[in-house]
Image (cartoon, helix red, strand yellow):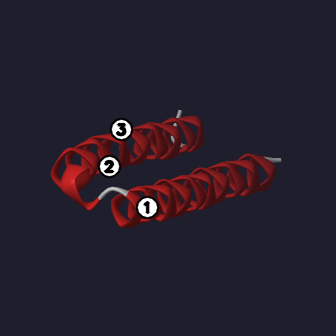
Amino acid sequence: MENIGLIGAGIGAGLAAIGAGIGIGRLTASAVESMARQPEMSGDIRGAMILMAAFIEGVALFGEVICLLAVFQ
């Protein structure tokens, strides 16, 4: 029965990583397209992109930690 918890935690951690990858990929694509359309705003767009990527990565890390806590509880 313990193996089911390990499998669930592995799936949860994997989904968190995949979700973060998709989110950061879409964010980067949109930011690059915005910079191509308005080159004079590239500094502001780049700063906002890095900040949002950090937030997305933080949420994914939080999800993975929750999965690990569920395993070792």
Q: Quadrant of residue 32?
A: bottom left
Number of marks in picture = 3
What distance separates the C-alpha of mark 1 from that of mark 3? 14 Å
Residue 55 disc label: 3
Name the residue furthest left. 43
Residue 23 position in % (x across, y down): 55, 52
C-beta proximity under 8 Å, tags 2 and 1? yes
Image position, residue 73 (x, y; %): 53, 32
Image location of residue 12, percent across then percent down: 67, 49
Q: Nearer the viewer, mark 1 or mark 3?
A: 1
Front residue of 16 and 7: 16
From the image, tell me which residue sits under label 2: 49
* N-term-proximal mark, 1 vs 3: 1
* Residue appearing at x 48%, y 45% in the figure: 60
Q: Relative to the observer, which residue lies in front, 52 or 43?
A: 43
Q: Which residue is painted at 74% across and 49% down in the image?
A: 8
Label placed on residue 28: 1
> Crowding at label 1, few (<14), some or many (≥20) Cα neighbours within 10 Å?
some
Separation of residues labelled 2 and 1 (CA atoms): 7 Å
Name the kind of residue labelled 3 in the image: Phe
Q: Amino acid at mark 2?
A: Met
SS for callout 1: helix
User: Dot 3 surroundings within 10 Å: few (below 14), some, or many (20 or more)?
Assistant: some
Name the residue: 61% across, 61% down.
Answer: 18
How far separated are the C-alphas under marks 3 and 2?
A: 10 Å
Label 2, secondary structure: give it.
helix
